[in-house]
Image (cartoon, rainbow, N blue to C red):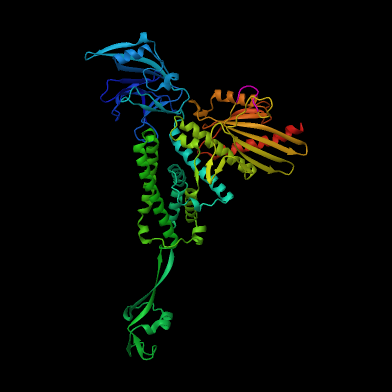
């Protein structure tokens, strides 16, 4: 990543110019950038944004999901646009709009153009130009920003999160959601006894295939299992019987000679005449023992690898066609193609191992093999194969939220919100056991879908019997609390919709008591340079107060964010509730999950205590 202070864009065969300047930065050196539309780039000197994404960055080693030019959320930029003066331009100035001169009308809320009287004129080669200035504020939006000035003057930038490694998080979130979604759907398929055979003729949607393959190629899945197999490959001892000249025999097979010796040629007399009724065999049976890796189990592994390779190649060709036809989603398809290319390289690397040359083609599946069922590496690959086959046959489609997210202008926020819900579901399973009711899975005519659309109430219900109480927990996704006096689950002011809410109902001999706790996923941070701490934003904590205070029956509301610091504010210093705060929830940290789990368990204990008070 190259940190840039000022960037000048000139398009080939166009007189238009666009300059983007981060005014708070210090100007460094001019650098050469291998992008044909970047005319001039000045680096940022003494960059203080350690821990943050750069204000203006150029990423030359990434293609697909992210555009080369990157801006940063919640950052101000000075914009200068140079446009040839024409009659068409003069007509536009009469109906002057705030978003002018960009073609993207949605920029009106982000771009504030300077008054017309501040614009400058310039004469170049007898051509009159207008220089328009203004300020661009990216606000808290992350994703694709269209800064195009015309049909030929296209420019798309990636507005990055302040969190410096959000690109890596994006892939981790997608992988984890794919894996968890697959597991949920397979669990439901087993529970409902769905007849999968009817779907054999159906061509799996490319998004379904990408979801399963993304889960399969996670570093802790197939690559780890294959490495385990190759480091400790199953082998067997083979006894091979040969007929060899008597002068070459070293270890004759006496039992074979006794049972089948009459089939061999003999000469009358000879050194062994006393053993064979006056005759000596010209040739004898000999058994050689050797170790081989050409076992049914290894043939199965080889077959599975070639099948996965074939699936990836087929999908690659399919997506290449889609990328050439559907230009609006070209960046999405290019991202998927890059992933597929990486997966094909992984498969090719494993299949190029010389040891596979010793292993023949599979002629039957050793389904009852104890090696496949119990041996490390082999057992995992058998599970992946079953999961992949079942998943591709299952008639389901990914959530529309997930599908739209891949081409949405704010992908990381949407993914993080869904991912947080999935993690809260896992926490609830750890606390309460298996779910009793699930409405996030929708089944219509054997079609499975994960129903996590915004604005629709989706819930998972859990129930646990303790020695002295019964606790029912309902985890909601995007539940709306409206202003209705006749509803118990309501907001007394404005309609509020936390990302995730948990309704806890405790029943014991004292009676019944219930409360809500809420969680809001916020993929953003504040940064303390002095100690490298990543904390939640103050405005997010303020919003948690709104949830706790406005939604009837709420005892707590908490931010989930990809930072490092847990911050909790208790109304009473010795009680977990009522409270608001923020919990770190990062893609690579299981400790975060354990902290949230322990806090929810503490709240359950305090509900009973409050009931007795």
Residue at left offset 32%, top offset 80%: 247
Where are the magenta residues, as a range?
490-495
- Residue at 39 percent across and 47 percent down: it is 312
Q: Judge left or right: residue 421 versus residue 510.
A: left
Nearest the eye: 591 or 299: 299
Q: Quadrant location of the N terminus?
A: top left
Which of 284/298 is in front?
Answer: 298
Q: Is residue 595 left or right of residue 119?
A: right
Judge whether 432 appears above or below 515 on screen: below
Q: Name the image quarter holding the C terminus.
A: top right
Residue nearest the observer in this picture, 71 or 336 = 336
Q: Quadrant of residue 546?
A: top right
User: Magenta segment: does it hold 183?
Assistant: no
Q: Is residue 378 above or below residue 122?
A: below
Query: Which secondary structure is most common in the magenta stretch?
Result: loop
Q: Residue furthest left?
A: 125
How far across and down, in percent of the image, does residue 14 sit? 27, 22
Q: From the top left corner, tell me how far across and down residue 351 is, in percent.
A: 37, 53
State yes or no: residue 491 in magenta: yes
Residue sitting at 37 percent across and 58 percent down?
Answer: 356
Work out whether residue 568 can be spotted.
no
Return the residue found at the far top: 117
How far across and down, in percent of the image, does residue 456 sit? 57, 33
């Amino acid at each position: 990543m190259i940190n840039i202070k000022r960037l000048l864009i000139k398009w080939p065969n166009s007189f238009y110019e666009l300059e983007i300047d981060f005014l708070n930065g210090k100007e460094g050196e001019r650098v050469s950038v291998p992008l044909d539309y970047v005319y001039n780039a000045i680096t940022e000197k003494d960059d203080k944004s350690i821990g943050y994404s750069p204000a203006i960055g150029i990423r030359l080693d990434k293609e697909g999901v992210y555009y080369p030019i990157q801006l940063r959320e919640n950052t101000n930029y000075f914009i200068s646009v140079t446009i040839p003066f024409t009659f068409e331009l003069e007509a536009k100035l009469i109906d002057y709009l705030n978003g002018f001169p960009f073609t993207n009308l949605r920029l009106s809320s982000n771009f504030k153009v300077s008054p017309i009287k501040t614009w400058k004129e310039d004469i170049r080669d007898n051509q009159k130009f207008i220089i328009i200035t203004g300020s661009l504020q990216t606000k808290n939006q992350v994703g694709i920003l269209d800064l195009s000035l015309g049909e030929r003057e296209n420019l798309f930038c990636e507005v990055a999160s302040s969190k410096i490694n959000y690109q890596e998080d994006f892939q981790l979130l997608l992988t984890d959601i794919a894996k968890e979604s697959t597991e949920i759907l397979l669990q439901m398929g087993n529970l409902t006894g769905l007849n999968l055979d009817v779907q054999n003729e159906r061509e799996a949607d490319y998004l379904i295939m990408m979801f399963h393959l993304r889960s399969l190629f996670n570093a802790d899945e197939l690559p780890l299992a294959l490495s385990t197999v190759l480091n400790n490959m199953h082998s067997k001892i083979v006894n091979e019987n040969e007929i060899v000249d008597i002068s070459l025999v070293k270890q004759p097979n006496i039992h074979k000679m006794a049972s089948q010796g009459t089939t061999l040629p003999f000469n009358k007399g000879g050194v062994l005449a006393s053993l064979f009724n006056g005759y000596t065999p010209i040739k004898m049976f000999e058994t050689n023992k050797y170790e081989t890796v050409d076992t049914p189990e290894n043939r199965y592994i080889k077959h599975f690898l070639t099948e996965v390779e074939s699936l990836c190649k087929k999908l690659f060709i399919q997506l290449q066609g889609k990328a050439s036809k559907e230009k609006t989603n070209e960046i999405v398809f290019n991202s998927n193609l890059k992933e597929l290319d990486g997966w094909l390289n992984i498969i090719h690397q494993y299949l190029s191992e010389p040891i596979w040359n010793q292993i023949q083609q599979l002629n039957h599946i050793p389904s009852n093999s104890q090696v496949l069922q119990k041996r490390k590496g082999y057992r995992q690959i058998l599970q992946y194969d079953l999961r992949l086959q079942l998943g591709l046959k299952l008639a389901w489609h990914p959530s529309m939220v997930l599908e739209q997210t891949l081409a949405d202008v704010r992908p990381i926020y949407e993914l993080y919100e869904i991912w947080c819900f999935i993690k809260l579901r896992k926490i609830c399973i750890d606390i309460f056991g298996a779910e009793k009711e699930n409405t996030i899975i929708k089944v219509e005519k054997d079609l499975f879908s994960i129903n996590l659309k915004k604005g629709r109430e989706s819930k998972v219900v859990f129930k646990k019997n303790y020695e002295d109480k019964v606790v029912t927990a309902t985890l909601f996704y995007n539940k709306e609390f409206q202003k209705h006096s006749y509803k118990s689950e309501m907001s007394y002011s404005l309609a509020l919709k936390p990302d995730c809410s948990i309704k806890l109902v405790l029943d014991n001999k004292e009676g019944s008591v219930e409360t809500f706790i809420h969680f809001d996923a916020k993929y953003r941070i504040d940064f303390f340079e002095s100690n490298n701490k990543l904390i939640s934003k103050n405005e997010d904590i303020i919003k948690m107060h709104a949830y706790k205070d406005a939604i009837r029956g709420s005892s707590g509301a908490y931010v989930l964010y990809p930072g490092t610091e847990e911050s909790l504010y208790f109304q009473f210093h010795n009680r977990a509730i009522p409270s608001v705060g923020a919990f770190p929830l990062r893609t690579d940290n299981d400790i975060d999950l354990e902290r949230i789990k322990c806090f929810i368990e503490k709240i359950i204990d305090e509900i009973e205590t409050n009931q007795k008070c």
